[in-house]
Amino acid sequence: MRIALFVTCVNDTLFPGTGRAVVTLLERLGHTVEFPQEQTCCAQMHFNTGYRPESLPLVERFARVFVGYDAIVTPSASCAAMIRHNHPVLAAQLGGAALRDAVAAVVPAVHELTEFLVDVLGVTDVGAAFPHRVTYHPTCHSLRGVRLEDRPLRLLRAVKGIELVELPGADSCCGFGGTFALKNADTSTTMLADKMSRVLGTGAEVLCAADNSCLMHIGGGLDRLNSGVRVMHLAEILATTEGAP
């Protein structure tokens, strides 16, 4: 199987360790991962802010760069949702027949990481070991955009040594929402405070999620509180073999 990593611009710029964790994880499972050097943004930021014509060159680029791969794996439910749902919309509305065909050929190969592990590779125990108390925040895009359901939790439950605790009100938004946090700062801050209170109530050492954008938002708030709770992308926990033989 020819596998490509779509790392996303947020991870590439701010959280490169997440991309490295995906490669470590998939290589441990016996797969070779390619990293197309020409990749860039999926255009979600442009699309969500109303700049649809400006999004089109990024859609074209994605289809060109990732053509021919059997699987395109991304550690971002948010970006996976953008590509699967909105690239075909942009191609249909603003592109020609060639782009529509190119997008239609590439989009079915796009998988969020946990989907790829559980549905395509058929594994839940990836050989991880992480002896810490962890709680999981299902981001809005993972819940409603790509509908990950319990895939992340199934993977986490198979991690050796982990103490996985339920997050109350887990399906509520953390208040990030990209530019929402900038344009509606007061509302976003209130939502963040609610989410942090619930995280702290679990007594967890680590909060994990499938999107670093939300972890950046929650993690920033937890740092300002000097809470001692750290945030980690799910891929980083699954790539860890802490304390394993």
Image (spheres, rainbow, N blue to C red):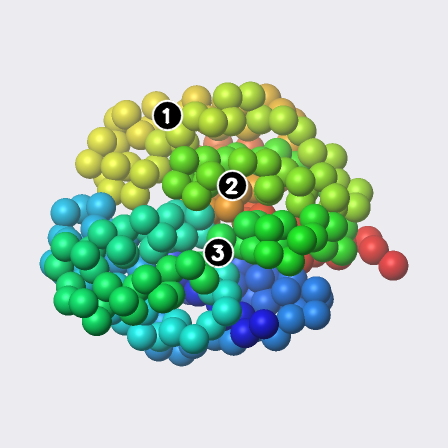
Horizontal arrangement in the rendering, residue 71 relative to residue 95 (left or right): right
Amino acid marked by disc 3: His
Residue 17 seen in render: no
Horizontal arrangement in the rendering, residue 25 relative to residue 106 (left or right): right
Label 2 element class: loop
- Residue at 22% x, 46% y is 48
Label 3 element class: strand
Q: Residue at label 3?
A: 111
Q: Residue at label 2?
A: 148
Residue 163 percent coordinates (x, y): 74, 35
Indicate whether 34 appears above or below 192: below
Camera-side residue of 115 and 33: 115
Residue 232 seen in render: yes
Horizontal arrangement in the rendering, residue 171 relative to residue 22 (left or right): left
- Residue at 56% x, 55% y is 116
Quarter of the image where the N terminus is located: bottom right
Quarter of the image where the C terminus is located: bottom right
How much space separates mark 3 and mark 2, taking CA atoms? 11 Å
Q: Residue at label 1?
A: 191
Residue 54 percent coordinates (x, y): 14, 60
Horizontal arrangement in the rendering, residue 44 relative to residue 81 (left or right): left
Indicate whether 132 appears above or below 82: above
Instruction: Compare marks 2 and 1 and give the one earlier in the sequence.
Output: 2
Amino acid marked by disc 2: Leu
